[in-house]
Image (cartoon, rainbow, N blue to C red):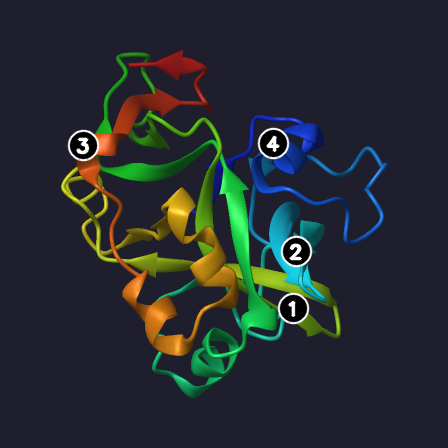
Amino acid sequence: MCNRARFAGEPETLHERFGGGWLTDRPRDNTFNPQELRPNKRAYVIREEAGERGVDVMNWDVLGGQAKWFMTNVRNLALPQWARLAERPENRCLVPLTEFAEFTPERHDLGDGKKPLKGEMWFSVMDQPVFAVAGFWQRTAAGDGFAMVTCDANELVEPIHPKAMITIVHEGDWTTWLRGGLDEVRALQRPYPAAAMTMRGPVFPTRGRDA
C-alpha cells in the first residue's frame, strides 16, 4: 500500500455521516492535518465506547513505533496479534476517507529533463463522498494507534496495485464491523465493487502536474 489517503471534509461531516459526538478532545493545534493521512500522523477514526458511536483521533500506526516500520495496514487476521484485535469489538474502528492513492507500476517521463517517476492514482467511491475503511486500534505506550484492514484488490485497483486494496465497508455493514462476531468481521474483508468506484490520475505532486 502506498500509505496515501485523504479526508477532505470537516469534523461536522463525520458527526452527520456516522453519528455521535467526540470521544476525545478535539485537536486544536496547527500541526494536525486530517485532510492528508500519512503514516504515524494523527487522523480521525470512528469507534464505539459504552455502546455509543463517536469520533476519535489516533496515530496511523497500530504498534506505536514498536516495529521497524509504521504498521499502517493489516491483512492476515489469522495472525495472533491481529486475531486478538479482530475478535474484540472494542478494538475495531472505521477510518473515514474521501479518497486513497496507489503509485503507478511504471515510471513516467514528463519531458521536463528530470528523471522519470511514478505517479499517484487516486481512488474514490462514487456514491459515498465520505466512505469508511475497516480498521483496528489499540492503546500503545506512544498513544492510541490504528491500522487499516486490507483485502484482495478489485478489478479497478488491481492493474495499479495487484497485491491488495483497503477494505471499504458498505454503509449497511458499519454496525456489523463495529459490533459483530469474528466470523461476521472476516466476511467483510472483501474488495469493494469496482463498478462503484472511480479513479483519477496519474498525478505528480512533486512536479505540480496532472497527466
Whole-angstrom CA distance, mark 3 to mark 2, is 32 Å
Figure quadrant of residue 205 = top left
Specify whether residue 2 is in view: no
Mark 1 lies on residue: 64
Q: Nearer the viewer, residue 137 or 71?
A: 137
Whole-angstrom CA distance, mark 1 to mark 3, is 36 Å
Number of marks in picture: 4
Mark 2 is on which residue type?
Asn
Q: Horizontal and vertical percent for residue 25?
A: 85, 48
Quick check: 68 above or below 173?
below
- Residue at 46%, 24% in the rendered image: 206
**Residue 195: image tag:** 3
- Residue at 50%, 83% in the rendered image: 84
Mark 2 lies on residue: 59
| Secondary element type, mark 2 | strand
Q: Is residue 195 left or right of residue 198?
A: left
Whole-angstrom CA distance, mark 4 to mark 3, is 26 Å
Mark 4 lies on residue: 35
Mark 4 is on which residue type?
Gln
